[in-house]
Amino acid sequence: MRLIIFFLIVYLFYCCVRRIIDALFYGGSCGRRPYSQKRQGGRAKQRIDELVKDPSCGVYIPKKDANTVRIDGKRYFFCSLECKEKFLKKRQSKLNAYK
Ligand SMILES: [Zn+2]
């Protein structure tokens, strides 16, 4: 019986934490408004655009402008073709070093 109460408290605490996190991320709006939130989220994403890091030079670039390459199912983003080639060469030499 005590265990159940304990879990209930933990669950309530978890709900509170989630609400705080939601409030932080969605600007403290009370209650869920799925429709408007979805629309706002979509707009915000388009406006801000997702930034990705170029592993070659360390610069952040918008995902849509990035040069991409897929290695072993993982996507890498680059600011330019030069960075992409540099990264691939580096990777190749690393792989050769292990052989
Ligand atoms: Zn770069």
Image: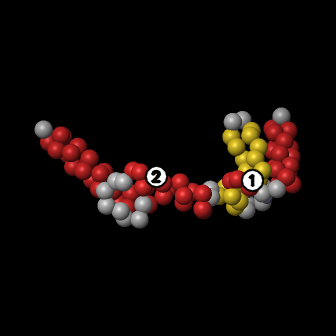
Question: Mark on residue 95?
Answer: none
Q: Residue at x 77, y 43 (%)?
A: 69
Percent coordinates x, y for residue 32 in the rendering: 34, 53
- Image-quadrant location for residue 37: bottom left
The answer to whether residue 90 of the structure is visible from this angle is: no
**Sequence-first disc among 2 and 1:** 2
Q: Quadrant of the N terminus?
A: top left
55 is higher (above) or lower (below) than 97: below
Q: Looking at numbered disc 2 in the image, what kind of residue is underneath it?
A: Lys
Percent coordinates x, y for residue 39 in the rendering: 48, 54
**Nearest the camera: 97 or 66?**
66
Report whether the residue tagged 1 is closer than 8 Å to ligand 1.
Answer: no
**Nearest the camera: 14 or 92?**
14
Q: Residues within 10 Å of mark 2 (few under 14, many from 20)?
A: few
Percent coordinates x, y for residue 16 in the rendering: 29, 56
Percent coordinates x, y for residue 61 in the rendering: 71, 59
Q: Residues within 10 Å of mark 1 (few under 14, many from 20)?
A: many
Residue carrying label 1: 66
Q: Residue at x 42, y 55 (%)?
A: 36
Q: Looking at numbered disc 1 in the image, what kind of residue is underneath it?
A: Ala
- Select label 2 or label 1 by which is in front: 2
Residue carrying label 2: 38
Task: Please tell me whether mark 1 sits on a helix, a strand or a loop.
Answer: loop
Q: Residue at x 31, y 51 (%)?
A: 14
Q: Residue at x 81, y 39 (%)?
A: 95
Name the side, left or right, on which 17 lies relative to 25.
Answer: left
